[in-house]
Amino acid sequence: MSAPALLACAAAALAAADAASGWIDGEPCALAQRVVVEARGEISECEVSSATAEARVEVRVPAPLGGALAVARAGLLPRAASAPDGAVGANGWAWPSDLRAISQGFHDGLSIDLAVTGEGALYAPYEGVVVRAGPDGGDVPEACLARPEWWRGANHTVLMRHEVGGRTIYSSHNHVSPGSPQRFGVAPGERVRAGQRVASAGMSGCTSGPHTHFTLSSSPSNAYPDIDPFAYLGRP
């Protein structure tokens, strides 16, 4: 199962569950299909329970060896207690880390690396829904093939979906400390508010030190994003 297929499938299932619960408008499976199309995939099966607002989606995404299949089930969860929030700006966006500073500018598309304090608090940049919280299923990146001492095991991510002025935007934190999202009550289907703590920066994935590799994207992916985060976050 590939990381793109897994993330697209999870995002599609959550979109369908959100529609079934009435949190967003639209026919559940039609919204799921729209998400999958953005990831260049197709839905082979979509089942929705209007009684429980649960959705099960099966997705196929093109891959070098002929395609990848993924299955995901989603249902909305009640909001859990949270840690202290980060500051939220007048436009409704929050700086995603507890230190307003950049440790590396644009790379791997429009990704940026955000510096953190020793606490390493990571926040939801905007209100939305968690799509994934845990290993992203990706392979060892080229940087760590060249520098294997940077490889710390599977990259842990928190991927979130946001509805912003009629546009769907996905954000992600990467190199997250394993298990930290769960400590803050964060799981797929969980609704989050801007500035809500969703994880702690860690040393998962390919990294030389604690920070968050942060992305904003028009598709449910944490790789090679296509949206400039400074357009929403502002500069440090």
Image (cartoon, rainbow, N blue to C red):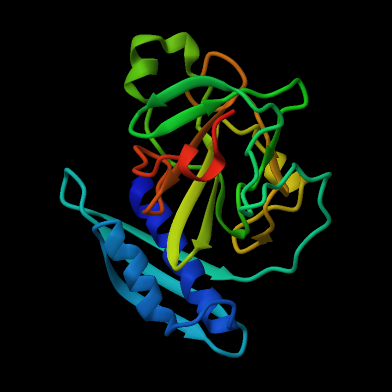
| Residue 26 position in % (x across, y down) | 44, 83
Q: Is residue 103 above or below residue 109?
A: above
- Residue at (36% x, 25% y) in the render: 141
Q: Nearer the viewer, residue 56 or 191?
A: 191
The number of numbered discs placed on residues in the rendered structure image is 0
Q: Is residue 1 visible?
A: no
**In the figure, is residue 171 to the left or right of 84?**
left
Left or right: where does residue 104 sit relative to residue 97? left
Q: Quadrant of the C terminus?
A: top right
Q: In this view, does 144 lie to the left or right of 84?
A: left
145 or 110, which is in the foreground? Answer: 110
Residue 153 pos. (x, y %): 51, 26
Q: In this view, does 203 lie above or below 182?
A: above
**Measured from the top left, where is residue 139 in percent x and y?**
37, 32
Residue in the image at 39% along x and 75% along y: 31
- Residue at the farthest front position: 90
* Residue 81 vertical placement versus 45 (above, below): above
Residue sitting at 30 percent across and 56 percent down? 39
Q: Foreground residue, 165 or 81?
A: 165
